[in-house]
Amino acid sequence: MTQAPPKDWAPEEAAEESLYLFTTVTDPAYRERKPGTLIALWAVDQAARQGRRWVRRGCFFPELVKYYETQGFALVKEMDRRAGHLYLLARRAERLNSDELGLTTVVTL
């Protein structure tokens, strides 16, 4: 999504240009390649390239909050929703060099 859902963010936050990730799911067979981290960092870089200020994401599990914090996201707020307790995180957009981060993609044909 190109904007965070407005109902979850204050009006001034929702008005800021951002990309939004809700969550990602990784097949355990590929976990060691860190595809979730790669997706998150790609979004951080893409947001910067598009002139957006933030990448925002939400999740319903405190374990994921800890994981997303290792990717540079900060917990901004929590709220109760019908679906459960929602955690909202954000990271400022920035240009990244995937080689410097030690991320590589392996394509098997």
Image (cartoon, rainbow, N blue to C red):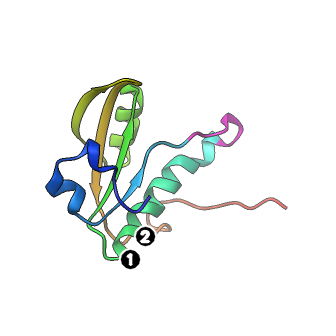
Out of 33 and 86, give the one closest to the viewer. Answer: 86
- Residue 74 visible? The answer is no
Q: What stretch is highlighted in magenta?
A: 25-30
Q: Where is residue 23 in the image (x, y as percent from the top left)?
A: 48, 42
- Secondary structure beneath label 2: helix
Left/right placement of residue 28 relative to residue 43 reads right
Residue 69 in percent (x, y) is at 32, 41
Pick the front one: 77 or 104: 77
Identify the disc placed on residue 46.
2
* Secondary structure category for the residue under label 1: helix
From what the image shows, is residue 67 above or below residue 56?
A: above
- Identified at 58% across, 39% down, the residue is 25
Task: Tell me the number on the disc at residue 20.
Answer: none
Marks 1 and 2: in contact by CB < 8 Å? Answer: yes
Q: Quadrant of the C terminus?
A: bottom right
For disc 1, the neighbor class at 10 Å (few under 14, some 14 to 19, many from 20) is: some
Asked if the stretch drawn in magenta spans residue 29, the answer is yes
Residue 76 found in image quarter: top left
> Quadrant of the rendered structure where residue 22 is?
top left
Drawn side of residue 27 relative to residue 13, left or right: right
Give the x, y percent position of residue 63: 40, 27
Report the number of discs.
2
Q: Which amino acid does label 1 sit on?
A: Arg
Residue at numbered disc 1: 49
Q: Which residue is drawn at 47% across and 63% down?
A: 42
Question: Disc 2 to disc 1, how far (Cα)?
Answer: 5 Å
